[in-house]
Amino acid sequence: MASTDDRREAREAKLDELHEKLTEAVDQLVSGEDWAKALAFAAQFRSRSFNNTLLIWMQHTAAHEAGLVPDPMPSYVAGYKQWQQLGHQVEKGQPGYQILAPVTGRFASPTPSDQTSWRRLNRNEKPRPGEQVRSKMVGVRPAYVWDAAQTSGDPIPAPPTPKLLRGEAPSGLRAGITRQIEAAGFQLHAVANAGAIYGANGVTNYGEKTVSVRDDMDPAAQTKTLAHELAHVLMHGPDQGDARQHRGIGEVEAESVALMVGAAHGMDTTGYTIPYVSTWAAQVDGEEPSKVVRATGERVRATAMKILDQLDTQMTGDGTPPGLERDSPRQGSKAVECTGASPSTMATAASQQVALADVRGMR
């Protein structure tokens, strides 16, 4: 039987392998077009963290090229036991796709507002009278998922794919985005043409708390621009500290959020123009471009999910098989904190923002 040290070494080796795979996946995002494709893919698997979508994308592509799966795009992914819950069995010889799952611990405190008062509970240890208990993320571990094509069982319905004519906006999307802009305290103004707003399609004015959008574009373009400006409202206000750290890539983030929101509704993303990754990722001082790419991807995904969670519109599937009980990724992410982990682990966890739902059924 393997010792604790042997198991720890094996886990660390797998984490090193996953880090190499992530680095390789990020290195393949050379151009703005590649980045846009990665985000469109992430929109179809938005129940996963951005890093995990990169890992799934890269490994599924390799499986397709090796003839192990028939389609270049996965349909649904889930853990081994999760597929068994749905009456499916992973076929012999089908390798799982390695992803990163959170490791959590229970912490207790008599004074939750005092961050130094939290102590980690041992297995089966009960809190003291009057203490509050909270689950916190303390690290990550390797886990595996399989695509539906790698399993046998009853047919699974194809993911929903809204059908849109060119230039058409998804039903209810413009109204839903408008409501969120107004809920944030901004007034929406339609302008006659780009000349009225300095040649732009849309402009967000934080001082006057207004969002202005051209009225002479087709409905899809207007809706996409509204999503772009809503991203600015949510991410780049003068009172948001994170925005200052990412000011060099603010337009990339806003355009990327709009792309994900649109892709989740079946909108054509080929018209999105994003600068070369190597250009914008190098604009954050003191950070490796690969880390900037991963952190930006997760910031974009988190903001897009915040927008999507408040919409009552028909969307594409999120990569979770029908009938599988999972918490929403945004709810899961809110419960995750980093405490007691090493600085490198905390940095990985922060950029990951891995949903607790990812770990269910994979233990």
Image (cartoon, rainbow, N blue to C red):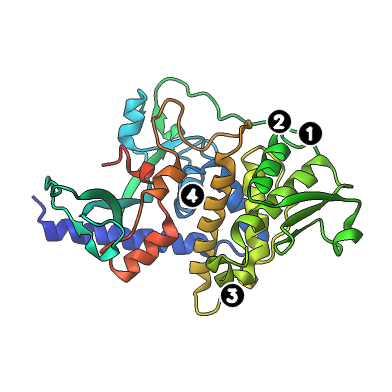
User: Of callouts 3 and 1, which one flags the residue occurring earlier in the amino acid sequence?
Assistant: 1
Is disc 4 surrounded by few (<14), some (14 to 19) or many (20+) residues within 10 Å? many
Please state the horizontal and vertical placement of residue 105, each as a whole percent of the image.
24, 52
Q: Residue furthest bottom?
A: 286
Spatial separation of the CA atoms under disc 1 and disc 4: 28 Å
Tell me if mark 1 has few (under 14), some (14-19) or many (20+) residues whose alpha carbon lies within 10 angstroms of its own: few
Residue 36: % across, % down:
64, 54
Q: Residues within 10 Å of mark 2 (few under 14, many from 20)?
A: few
What's the residue type where badge 1 is placed?
Leu
Q: Earlier in the sequence, mark 4 or mark 3?
A: 4
286 with respect to 208 (left or right): left
Residue at (87%, 47%) from the top-left corner? 215
Tag 1 near tag 2, CB within 8 Å: yes
Determine the secondary structure under disc 4: helix
Q: CA distance from mark 2 to mark 4?
A: 24 Å
- For label 2, the residue is 163
Q: Is residue 122 visible?
A: yes
The reply to whether callout 3 and callout 1 are in contact (CB within 8 Å) is: no
Query: Is residue 34 in view?
Result: no
Task: Answer above or below: position of 254 versus 287.
Answer: above
Image point (61%, 32%), residue name: 312
Q: From mark 3 to mark 1, how far is it between C-alphas? A: 37 Å
Q: Amino acid at mark 3?
A: Ala
Query: Which residue lies under the disc numbered 3?
Result: 282
Q: Is residue 229 left or right of residue 194?
A: left
Task: Tell me the amino acid under the disc marked 2.
Answer: Lys
Callout 3: few (<14), some (14-19), or many (20+) C-alpha neighbours within 10 Å?
Answer: some
**What numbered label is drawn on residue 53?**
4
Name the element at disc 3.
helix
Q: Secondary structure at mark 1?
A: loop
